[in-house]
Structure formats: C-alpha cells, structure tokens
Image: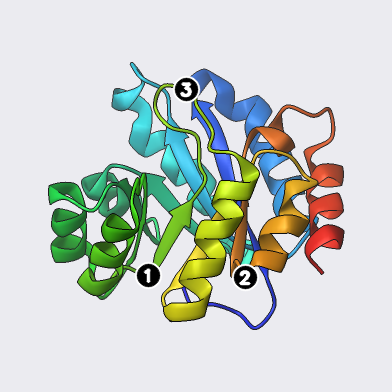
Amino acid sequence: MVADPSCRLYLITPQLTAADLEAFAPRFVAALAAGDVASALVRVAAGSEGDAKRIAQRLVEAAAPHDVALLVENDIRLAARAGADGAHVQGAGESLADALASLHPDRIVGVGGLRSRDDAMNAGEAGVDYVMFGEPRPDGFTPPLAETAERIAWWAEIFETACVGYAETLEAAATLRAAGADFVALGDAVWRTDAPALAVARAQALIA
C-alpha cells in the first residue's frame, strides 16, 4: 500500500460468517463504489474458520473491479490461499515477523494493535507497508479520538511509512485526516447504517 497525496478510505468488514455473505456482498460492493476506497480488511467470525477461504474469496472477487486492495485479518496462509492482496496482523511481535517473511514483497503487510510508540517504530523498521492507530482493542475499548490523532500527527511528522487512523464515527474521519493520516479506516460507522454507500460518501466528503 503506497500512501497517496490525498487521504483515502480503508474499510473494515464486520466479523463475517458464510451465512452473512449473500446479504453482505451487495452492501460491500455499493460501499466500495461510493468513495475513494484504497483497501478493505476482511474479518472472519470466530467459529467460521472452515469457511474463511470462501468468505475471503468472495470479497476478493467483489473488490477487484474497484481496484481495492483486499486484506485478511491475522491469517497469512489465508491471504495466499484466497488470492488476497495481503494481511493485517496485530502487534509488532512474532506474528508480524512471520507475515513479513511469508508475504513480502509480493503482498501487503499492515499492522495494528500497537500500544506504544516503541511498538510502532519497531514495526516501521521491520518494513511494514502501513501502521494503524486507534482501532478497537480485543476487549472492545476504542482509544479516545484525541489520543489517536496525537499518535498519527507524531508518526506523520517523522516517518514515511503509511499511517492508517481508525475512525469510530464518520465525523472523526475529518480529525484524523487533519492530523496527517494517509488512510482513514471505517468499520461499524459504515456497516451499522441502513445505507453503507451513503456513509462512505459522507466520509469521503469529510476527508476530501
């Protein structure tokens, strides 16, 4: 993933099961078409690992006509098996090292779950394609917007590696863009609406 001079969008799917695909796929396609979406991250629900390849492949096929890079969460083998463009892993530890060894340079490797500045710097030095700040933690806690914006501003001033800022609300997208994010990630703020495409269009307007 190469940072664009203008800020772009990065969509994060809900945790999906195979049963969700028929209803979700059209919403996903409409959302991709509604703004300048650079990337999308597929999340597979716990217990649906057996259907992970089917889920990821369906969304890979949906993303391709829109020139959207399709990544999978925390599964480097799935990224290759499903023909995805890369993987997003949590933390600057062994999982990241494995992802870089397995996927680079042919596929994208991004990282989130970076609790400290040292973790972020270690990830950047390891050669990731992007770092993500502000996404919800496993326990559901989302860092305050001001904290995420501060971390993005620090990163953007010093490092060249692309930076993704997670926006809990559509309105937060503008704040993250102003802080220096190369990409703004949106999850529930898009999918928990009746019209994801309208939500994406609104976010696009806010970061334009």
- Pointer 2 or 1: first along the chain: 1
Q: Residues within 10 Å of mark 3 (few under 14, many from 20)?
A: some
Question: Which residue is painted at 70% across and 54% down in the image?
Answer: 32
Name the kind of residue labelled 3 in the image.
Answer: Thr
The residue tagged 1 is: 129
Question: Which residue is painted at 69% across and 77% down in the image?
Answer: 6
* CA gap, disc 1 and disc 3: 28 Å
Percent x, y for residue 205? 87, 61
Question: Which residue is painted at 33% across and 16% down in the image?
Answer: 47
Name the kind of residue labelled 1 in the image.
Answer: Asp
Q: Quadrant of residue 179?
A: bottom right
The residue tagged 2 is: 180
- Pointer 1 or 3: first along the chain: 3
Name the kind of residue labelled 2 in the image.
Answer: Gly
One can see residue 26 in this view? yes
The local secondary structure at tag 2 comes to loop
Percent x, y for residue 144? 59, 39
Q: Nearer the viewer, mark 3 or mark 2?
A: 2
* CA gap, disc 2 and disc 1: 16 Å
The residue tagged 3 is: 17
The local secondary structure at tag 1 comes to loop
The local secondary structure at tag 3 comes to loop
Q: Nearer the viewer, mark 1 or mark 3?
A: 1
One can see residue 186 in this view? no
Question: Which residue is painted at 73% across and 39% down in the image?
Answer: 169
Please tell me whether residue 64 is drawn above or below residue 116 in the rendered image: below
